[in-house]
Amino acid sequence: MIASEAAPLIKVGGLADVVGALPKELAALGHEVRVVCPLYAGIKKTEKWIPYDTPLTVNVGESDQQCRIWETRLPGSAVEVYFIEFNEFYDRPEVYGNSGKGPADEDRRFVFLSRAALNLCYYLGWMPDVIHCHDWPTALVPVFLNTNDFYEPLGRAASVLTIHNLQHQGMFPFSSIEYANLPRSVYRPDCLESMGSVNFLKGGIYNATKITTVSPEYAREILEPANGCGLHHILKFRAADLIGEINGIDTDIWNPESDPLLPANFSCRDTKGKDACKAVLQKELKLEGKPAVPLFGMVSRLYHQKGLDLLAEAIPGIMETKDVQIALLGTGDKEIEKKFLELAERYAGRVGVHIGFSDELAHRVYAGSDYFTMPSRFEPCGLSQMYAMRYGAPPVARSTGGLIDTIDGAIDGDYSAATGIMFADAESADLGLAMGSAADTYIEKPEEYNRMRLNGMKKDFSWKKPAATYENIYRWAVEVRKQAHHLRAY
């Protein structure tokens, strides 16, 4: 696997969670899995890390570059992780960008990662059957395999490209092709060319042996113009090789029975500890200590995609009509941050806001909330709703993407099989109505609420099923790649 992030070593979003968890599950099934990632300044090396004395040569630009390789393991596993140390590109705290303090080199940073990761296979003398790359930062890998490396030993490897978020595509000038030392022929509409620029993700979609997304519903949505971000026609062309599989979560880390970050543990068999978690959360976010009031939690990046601006618009109406509490942990758009800080001041004791991110507080928000709100405009998969259900906080979520695939909404007031409450349109009024219905259920129908909560806590969100699906995808990809080489031979 080649990726720009790998949890828990370096994480920005859900991509890191996949790269940190799926390899461990595949290794448990008997596969040999290795992960490659850049060594950013924010990653702390330990005494267990192994440095390689011989530098790795990376053939990019006008002259070859050399980088250093470090080997470690994914925590709690035997999965080998190789970090690429190249300070010119990665010795900065950010995974993406450079805070405007340096050159616009994002294309070269990830061209370098893709080329270095492939060269590392030759360096180690290890030829994988499948190379699994993630999102635009490594989407040039299938392009390399179909061009520069096709007749090399590594060219027999199949490629799988996972699209975690189609909105981010990696658009760069033609010079990125020159830096990659790719043939000029790749600059064409059915490869990397896009409206006069180079589109890394588009090239990956055209060239990958198989393409996956992180939920079946998102795989369907991106075939339509409204959600295809300009690539729907290309995805339709590759639809036979496009597979949606929902992500799993690390059920060892996210386990309310044993989570060391909680003030009290609990399970679907005994939920008493959840009351203690709610009391601690209320105190921590300066909310009134009222155990009978429904508490809606959120842990989110505060961006347009996540729809938290809709929540900010809905809160005044909710506060006027329902006795509820809000607990928000997040950071992002400064205007949205400002709105929530103003709401926390306006509704002191009822709205608690922590701007920033804390893994410890995130666990306590999931555990201490009665509901979890996700008004996403689009959601390729989403992990928060799975964490929330596992921690006994039924989601109140918009019907989109992976939220549809993971949440069983109550139908006409029937909560017998429900694990959450869904609403259709990305409108603050619809969100307000859904949260109002959730509050009424909590207060007036406690048996139905408890049934919904327990339904969610009992669901299996582990990587067991997704890993088995990926096994099949890899096998299909290997067979297709064999055929491609056979046909090219003639």
Image: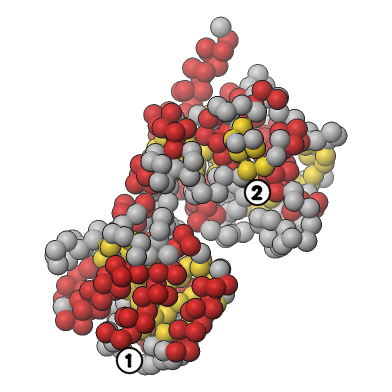
Q: Is residue 49 visible?
A: no
Residue drawn where x is 26% and y is 76% of the image: 436
What amino acid does circle 2 point to? Cys
**Percent x, y for residue 377?**
40, 58
89 or 275: nearer the viewer: 89
Q: Residue at x 70, y 44 (%)?
A: 107
For mark 1, does the 10 Å Cα neighbourhood hold few (<14), some (14 to 19), or many (20 or more) residues? Answer: some
**Residue at the spot 65% in from the left edge and 37% down from the top edge:** 197
- Where is residue 303? Give x, y as percent: 51, 64
Direction right: furthest residue: 63
Q: Quadrant of the N terminus?
A: top right
Mark 2 residue element: strand
Q: Is residue 226 left or right of residue 334?
A: left
Q: Is residue 80 left or right of residue 371?
A: right
Q: Could one spot residue 299 in this view of the protein?
A: yes
Q: In the drawing, what numbered circle is on residue 37?
A: 2
Q: Which residue is mark 1?
A: 290
Mark closer to the observer (1, 2): 1
Q: Residue 251 location, x and y as percent?
A: 41, 60
Residue 416 occupies quadrant: bottom left
Query: Which of the numbered marks, if any, corresponds to residue 464?
Result: none
Three-letter amino acid code of the residue under disc 1 = Lys
The picture places residue 465, in percent across and down from the top left corner, at: 36, 46
| Callout 2 crowding tier (Cα within 10 Å): few <14, some 14–19, many ≥20 | many
